[in-house]
Structure formats: C-alpha cells, structure tokens
Amino acid sequence: MMRKYHVRFGGGPMVKDRQRHLASGLPYIAAEIIARHFPERFEAEEGVIWIEEYPRTPEQRSRGMPAFSQAEFSSYTPRMEYLGRIKRIRIGLPTWRHLEEAEVQALIGPLDED
C-alpha cells in the first residue's frame, strides 16, 4: 500500500540557504516519519520513495527550473544520535536527483492539483 504525505516547510529571511538547511535535517525528518508510519521499511534496500516538490512560478518553469527532486538515502538503518542535547533517530545521508513530472507520476501515480 502506498501512502502519500504532503508536508510544507516554512522559510523566509531567517533561513538564508533554505535548501541546504532542510537537507541537513532530512535524515532526521525522514527517520521519524518512517518510524511512525513505515517501521517495517527500515533496513530495506529502498526504504521509501522520498520526493520533494518545489513550487515554481510560470517564469521559473519556462527557464527549466526543476519542480521535483528525489532523495535516495545511503542507508535506511536507523541509529540514535544526539542533535544538540536531544536524542534523535536518523538514517543515512541523502543524494538528490531531479525528476520530471512524468517520472513522478510513474512512481506515485497522478499528482493532486492542490
């Protein structure tokens, strides 16, 4: 069974490089979502399909800016570590590749228009 989650992250002037900031936290965010919703997927070769959508203006789309990226993690083995003084679960580091809309639809089905 496939479950789709739509998560929005805020940003703005306080976060200068939002993409890098979010990417550094992704191993923790992904591990927590997997632990809560898909614990049987830990340690699988492909634990989950993680796709991020970046809202684009018509001008950005016309310049070819990608609207979707897929993160593939180096490992889906959960491990505990301290982030600051808080013990957090995490998985391996992500690598990214851009996806065309057709590739996204092939992976997860039709896209919602909201």
Image (tube, helix red, strand yellow):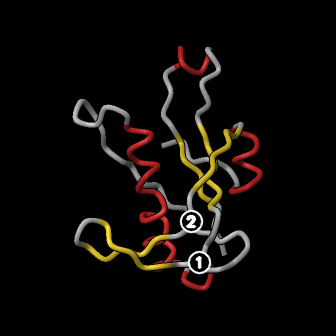
Identify the residue at horizontal 50%, vertical 27% (top origin).
56
> Disc 1 residue type?
Thr
Contact, CB < 8 Å: mark 1 with mark 2?
Answer: yes
Q: Is residue 7 left or right of residue 40?
A: left
Q: Which residue is drawn at 46% across and 71% down?
A: 90
Report which quarter residue 68 is drawn in: top right
Residue 2, given in percent of the width and then of the height, sits at: 64, 70
Give how far across and how far down residue 101 sits, in percent.
69, 38
Q: How many marks?
A: 2
Image quarter of residue 81: bottom left
Q: Horizontally, is 71 left or right of 18 in the view?
A: right
Viewer-proximal residue, 53 or 12?
12
Q: In which quarter of the image is residue 67?
A: top right
Q: Whole-percent x and y of residue 42?
A: 60, 80
Q: Is residue 41 above or below residue 9?
A: below
Q: Where is residue 78 in the image (x, y as percent from the top left)?
A: 52, 78
Alpha carbons under labels 1 and 2: distance apart? 7 Å
Q: Identity of the amino acid at label 2?
A: Gly
Q: Is mark 1 on a helix, strand or loop?
A: loop
**Residue at the image position 48 percent from the left and 43 percent from the top:** 114
Where is mark 1, residue-wise? 77
As drawn, 4 above or below 22: below
| Left or right: 78, with 25 as reference point | right
The crowd level at tag 2 (other Cα within 10 Å; few <14, some 14-19, many 20+) is: some
Quadrant of the image containing the N terminus: bottom right
Disc 2 element: loop
Residue 66, above or below 11: above
What's the mark number on residue 92? 2
Q: Which residue is drawn at 60% across and 24% down?
A: 65
**Front in this rendered view, residue 13 or 51:** 13
Q: Residue furthest bottom?
A: 40
